[in-house]
Image (cartoon, grey):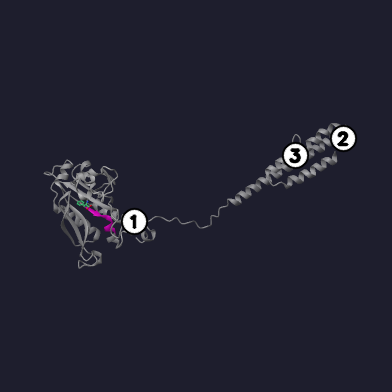
C-alpha cells in the first residue's frame, strides 16, 4: 500500500503541474480525490490492514491527500494568473500611439452668406421665420393673386404632390408673405429664407431645388421709397458701399407696382463682360408693393395699411460673393470644394 500511495502521489503531482487549464485541473481532482477517485479507493482498502499498519498508512494517506490538495490549489492560482496575463496582453492599450484625427465638418459657403444676410435683416428689426416646403396651392398661388389658369401653376413647372393640385413643393418663398400676414400682428417686418422647387433641368445656373429669401414689411404709410431705401441698404451691405443699383419695372401677380433690382456688374463696372452676359447689370431680386387684393385676402385694410415685399435667390448671392461660376458646385458638396471657403 505504501508503494501504491507513493505512486499516486508521484503521478498526481506530475499531472497537476502539467495542467494548462482549470478544467484539466478539476478532472484530476475528481480522478484522485473524488468519491470514486484513486486515493479514496485506496483508503477504502484500509480495513484489510493490520492494527499497527492502519494508523501509519492512514497518516501517509492523509499526507498524500494534503499535498495533492496543496498542489491543486497552487496550480489553480498559477493557471488563473496565466489566464489574466494572456487577457492583459490581448487587451493592452498603447496610449502612446497617436490618435486618429476627427475630420470636423465645414460650414457651407452658401449658409455663411445666409447668416450674414440674416444679421443684416435682424439689425434692421426684421423677424426671421421658417416656412413649410410642402405647401398648399392656396398659399403658394391662390392667396398670392395667382389664379388657377396662371402659367406658373402648370404641371410642367411645379412639383405637385396630389392629383388635385392642392399640395405641392413650394415654387417660391412668397407663401411666407401670406403666412406672416395671417399670423402676425401689424406692423410686420419678416424675413424668411428657405428651399423652393421648380421643374428645371440642372445646368450651371439652374437647379430643381434652390433657395430664396423672402421679405415683407406691412405698416401704415409704407411706400416705394421704403422699398428702395431698404433694399439699397441691404444690397450695399452685401456687395459693398459703392455698389450701383437700378430698379426696373416688372410684373408679379402679388405686387403692384412690381420691379426687379439690378446691381451694376462688379467685374466690368457696367461695360459688359461674361459675368453679366454682356449686359453690364446683374439682376438680384424681385420686389414690389404688396397688392391690395393680397392684403385684403389676409384681412388687412389696404386703405389703412400698405407694404412692400421682395424675394431674392440665395445661390446667386453666394456665387457672386465667392466668384463661383457654376451653381452645381454649391449642391455637389465635394469637401475639396467646400473647404476653400
Ligand atoms: N416670388 C418671386 C419670384 O420667385 C419674387 C418676389 C418676391 C417678387 C416678393 C415680388 C415680391 O420670382
Residue at image point 72% right, 42% down: 72
Q: Position of residue 195 (x, y in %)?
A: 29, 50
Residue under numbered circle 2? 53
Q: Position of residue 169 (x, y in %)?
A: 28, 47
Is there any visible trace of residue 179 in the rendered image? no
Q: Which is closer to the viewer, label 3 or label 2?
A: 3
Q: Do the residues labelled 1 and 3 touch (CB within 8 Å)?
A: no
Q: Which of 10 and 300 is in front in this view?
A: 300
Q: Distance between the residues labelled 1 and 2?
A: 100 Å
In the picture, the quarter occupied by the C terminus is bottom left
- Residue 298 found in image quarter: top left
In the picture, the quarter occupied by the N terminus is top right
The segment highlighted magenta reads 311-318
**Of helix, strand and loop, which mostly describes the magenta segment?**
helix
Residue at image point 86% right, 32% down: 48
Element at label 1: helix
Q: How far apart are marks 1 and 3 (CA)?
A: 76 Å
Q: Closer to the N terminus: mark 1 or mark 2?
A: 2
Q: Closer to the N terminus: mark 3 or mark 2?
A: 3
Image position of 27 with respect to 266: above or below: above
- Neighbor class of circle 1 (other Cα within 10 Å; few <14, some 14-19, many 20+) is some
Q: Position of residue 159 (x, y in %)?
A: 28, 48
User: In the figure, is residue 293 to the left or right of 339?
Assistant: left
Q: Distance between the residues labelled 3 and 2?
A: 26 Å
Residue under numbered circle 3? 31
Residue under numbered circle 1? 331
Q: Which is closer to the viewer, label 1 or label 3?
A: 1
Is 157 inside the magenta-drawn segment? no
- Neighbor class of circle 2 (other Cα within 10 Å; few <14, some 14-19, many 20+) is few
- Neighbor class of circle 3 (other Cα within 10 Å; few <14, some 14-19, many 20+) is some
Element at label 3: helix
- Residue 206 found in image quarter: bottom left
Amino acid at each position: 500500500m505504501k508503494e501504491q500511495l507513493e505512486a499516486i502521489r508521484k503521478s498526481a503531482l506530475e499531472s497537476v503541474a502539467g495542467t494548462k487549464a482549470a478544467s484539466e485541473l478539476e478532472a484530476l481532482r475528481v480522478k484522485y480525490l473524488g468519491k470514486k477517485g484513486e486515493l479514496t479507493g485506496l483508503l477504502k482498502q484500509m480495513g484489510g490492514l493490520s492494527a499497527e499498519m492502519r494508523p501509519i498508512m492512514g497518516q501517509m494517506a492523509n499526507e498524500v491527500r494534503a499535498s495533492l490538495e496543496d498542489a491543486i490549489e497552487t496550480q489553480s492560482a498559477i493557471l488563473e494568473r496565466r489566464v489574466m496575463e494572456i487577457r492583459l496582453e490581448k487587451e493592452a492599450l498603447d496610449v502612446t500611439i497617436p490618435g486618429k484625427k476627427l475630420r470636423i465638418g465645414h460650414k457651407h459657403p452658401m449658409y455663411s452668406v445666409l447668416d450674414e444676410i440674416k444679421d443684416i435683416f435682424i439689425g434692421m428689426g426684421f423677424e426671421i421665420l421658417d416656412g413649410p416646403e410642402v405647401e398648399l396651392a392656396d398659399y403658394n398661388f391662390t392667396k398670392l393673386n395667382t389664379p388657377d389658369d396662371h402659367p406658373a401653376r402648370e404641371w410642367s413647372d411645379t412639383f405637385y404632390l396630389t392629383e388635385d393640385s392642392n399640395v405641392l413643393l413650394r415654387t417660391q418663398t412668397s407663401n411666407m408673405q401670406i403666412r406672416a400676414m395671417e399670423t402676425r400682428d401689424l406692423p410686420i417686418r419678416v424675413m424668411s429664407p428657405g428651399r423652393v422647387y421648380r421643374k428645371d433641368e440642372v445646368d450651371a445656373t439652374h437647379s430643381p431645388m434652390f433657395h430664396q429669401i423672402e421679405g415683407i414689411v406691412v405698416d401704415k404709410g409704407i411706400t416705394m421709397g421704403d422699398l428702395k431705401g431698404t433694399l439699397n441698404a441691404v444690397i450695399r451691405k452685401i456687395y459693398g458701399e459703392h455698389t450701383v443699383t437700378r430698379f426696373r419695372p416688372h410684373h408679379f401677380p402679388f405686387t403692384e407696382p412690381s420691379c426687379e433690382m439690378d446691381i451694376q456688374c462688379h467685374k466690368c463696372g457696367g461695360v459688359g463682360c461674361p459675368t453679366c452676359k454682356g449686359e453690364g447689370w446683374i439682376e438680384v431680386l424681385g420686389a414690389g408693393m404688396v397688392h391690395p387684393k393680397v392684403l385684403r385676402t389676409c384681412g388687412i385694410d389696404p386703405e389703412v395699411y400698405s407694404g412692400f415685399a421682395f424675394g431674392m435667390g440665395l445661390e446667386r448671392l453666394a456665387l457672386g460673393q465667392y466668384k463661383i461660376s457654376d451653381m452645381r458646385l454649391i449642391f455637389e458638396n465635394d469637401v475639396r470644394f467646400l473647404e476653400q471657403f
